[in-house]
């Protein structure tokens, strides 16, 4: 929408839409570059999906890797991203994330973020390279970011729903139209207002995993029957507003389902982290119908999800007492009945209706793989600390893939400028970062790469926006 003697409710140099990792990082950098900044958030609390995430950060060449003699480089991380993304990642963007990962870790540490002292190996990564926040969730990063915003005097304006951009005659983004005191789920509730962006706007509103109508247009299989790990506010209106001003869409139909989510709880819950940090790296996944493994438990998410959904399988992850040492949500999982605990494998098999003989044979083949140092069946990487699944108690979790991450969004360049059609030039005054952008992850995002993506490009967007 073009501005014509627009009446502004208030004005700032930089207006940031969204209060997750990308938005808060952008706000901090823009403020420290000398700009006045406001962060707009439609939900009644800040943080969005970022706050409820697992708090997992992929870093190449980190101090923890060095302490454990793990050889890793940004180039290896880049190769892993391109492999998982089926080569349709935009290489320049993916490379920026990898090369910025170590500096991003240092930046979060400078803000007071605390991490556990162990390094994790997530699916699709060639080596262990994933840090986990001390609290085991993304709030361990979001809260220090919010604290820094308060120190810098950056207002976080909640219950403010973004509706559309306001453009000048030269197509430059001059501000945004919003609804103040809005209510989630009520499209027109609230008071209309216009907020001026004297320099630029940063779009960091996240993905659309909880927007059933929009995701159905991209993938008709993802009906309302398919659960999501996303919070209620993960909807598409920010992305749609960008498309309405000719932002170029990238990879919108590539929507990732999380293979580690639990059948026995709604949303992200507490089981996802258990499976990610224990069930897959230190255990095995079997089809309850057959008692057999059917996929490399450490492959990328797309491969695991496709295998889980094939032929109506009933996926169950199994791990023993030695494999749950890093499962930060174990007690919560047990308390909520998401993970079950058993004294014997026979009890576990009976509870999950798994054929006992076949399960015993599967565990014996897995033991022999560990003895020989190679998973002949599926090629799972076998780290030195893996042990046979034979030490009670035993644990199981029933799994169900859920909509988790949208790889697609608007096209950006290396400065986080939003690119438009048909001229393929940046839209003046508009930047974007995080899950609302496309191209970084290609066909499938590796676990723990989202946070580093959001922080790297959030910081770039904030710096660039302040220079507009």
Image (cartoon, rainbow, N blue to C red):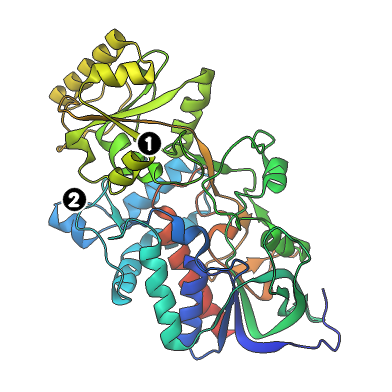
Can you name the residue that lies furthest to the bottom here?
Answer: 34
Within 10 Å of disc 1 (Cα), the crowding (few <14, some 14-19, many 20+) is: some
Q: Which mark is residue 122?
A: none
Q: Quadrant of residue 14?
A: bottom right
* Front residue of 151 and 374: 151
Helix or strand or loop: what does disc 2 sit on? loop
Can you name the residue that lies furthest to the right here?
Answer: 4
Helix or strand or loop: what does disc 1 sit on? loop
Q: Residue at x 29, y 11 (%)?
A: 356
Q: Which residue is mark 2?
A: 70
- For the residues labelled 2 and 1, the Cα–Cα distance comes to 36 Å
Q: Locate residue 417, reporting x and y percent.
A: 60, 70
The quadrant of the image that shows the C terminus is bottom right
* Front residue of 38 and 256: 38
Q: Report the mark closest to the observer, 2 or 1.
A: 1
Q: Locate residue 188, reporting x and y percent.
A: 79, 65
Q: Which residue is mark 1?
A: 337
Q: Is residue 419 above or below residue 310?
A: below
Q: Is residue 16 visible?
A: yes
In this picture, residue 160 sits left or right of residue 111: right
Q: Locate residue 386, reporting x and y percent.
A: 18, 34
In this picture, residue 372 sits left or right of residue 61: left
């Amino acid at each position: 929408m073009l501005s014509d003697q627009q009446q502004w409710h208030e004005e700032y140099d930089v207006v940031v839409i969204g209060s997750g990792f990308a938005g808060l990082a952008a706000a901090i950098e823009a403020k420290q570059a000398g700009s006045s900044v406001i962060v707009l958030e439609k939900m009644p609390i800040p943080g969005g999906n970022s706050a409820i995430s697992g708090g997992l950060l992929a870093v190449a060449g980190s101090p923890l890797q060095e302490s454990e003699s793990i050889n890793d480089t940004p180039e290896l991380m880049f190769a892993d991203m391109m492999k998982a993304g089926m080569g349709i990642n935009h290489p320049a963007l993916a490379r920026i994330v990898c090369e910025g990962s170590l500096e991003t870790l240092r930046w979060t540490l400078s803000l007071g973020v605390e991490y556990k002292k162990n390094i994790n190996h997530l699916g699709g990564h060639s080596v262990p390279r994933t840090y986990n926040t001390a609290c085991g969730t993304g709030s361990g990063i979001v809260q220090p970011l919010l604290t820094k915003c308060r120190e810098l005097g950056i207002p976080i304006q909640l219950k403010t729903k973004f509706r559309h951009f306001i453009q000048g005659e030269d197509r430059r983004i001059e501000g945004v139209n919003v609804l103040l005191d809005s209510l989630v789920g009520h499209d027109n509730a609230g008071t209309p207002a216009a907020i001026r962006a004297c320099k630029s706007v940063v779009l960091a509103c996240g993905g659309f995993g909880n927007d059933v109508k929009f995701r159905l247009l991209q993938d008709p299989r993802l009906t309302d029957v398919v659960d999501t790990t996303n919070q209620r506010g993960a909807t598409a209106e920010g992305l749609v507003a960008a498309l309405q001003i000719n932002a170029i869409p990238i990879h919108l139909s590539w929507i990732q389902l999380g293979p580690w989510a639990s059948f026995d709880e709604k949303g992200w819950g507490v089981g996802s982290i258990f499976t990610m940090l224990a069930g897959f790296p230190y255990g095995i996944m079997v089809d309850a119908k057959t008692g057999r493994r059917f996929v490399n438990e450490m492959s990328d998410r797309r491969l695991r999800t496709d295998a889980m959904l094939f032929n109506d399988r009933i996926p169950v992850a199994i791990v023993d007492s030695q494999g749950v040492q890093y499962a930060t949500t174990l007690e919560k999982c047990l308390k909520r009945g998401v993970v079950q605990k058993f004294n014997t494998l026979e009890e576990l098999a009976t509870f999950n209706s798994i054929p006992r003989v076949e399960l015993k044979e599967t565990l014996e083949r897995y033991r022999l793989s560990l003895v020989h140092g190679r998973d002949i069946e599926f090629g799972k990487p076998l780290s030195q600390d893996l042990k046979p699944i034979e030490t009670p108690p035993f644990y199981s979790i029933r799994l169900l893939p859920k909509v988790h991450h949208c790889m697609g969004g608007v096209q950006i360049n290396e400065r986080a400028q939003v690119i438009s059609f048909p001229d393929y030039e940046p839209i003046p005054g508009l930047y974007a970062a995080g899950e609302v952008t496309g191209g970084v992850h290609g066909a499938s995002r590796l676990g723990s790469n989202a946070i580093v993506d959001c922080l790297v490009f959030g910081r770039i967007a904030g710096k660039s926006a302040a220079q507009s």
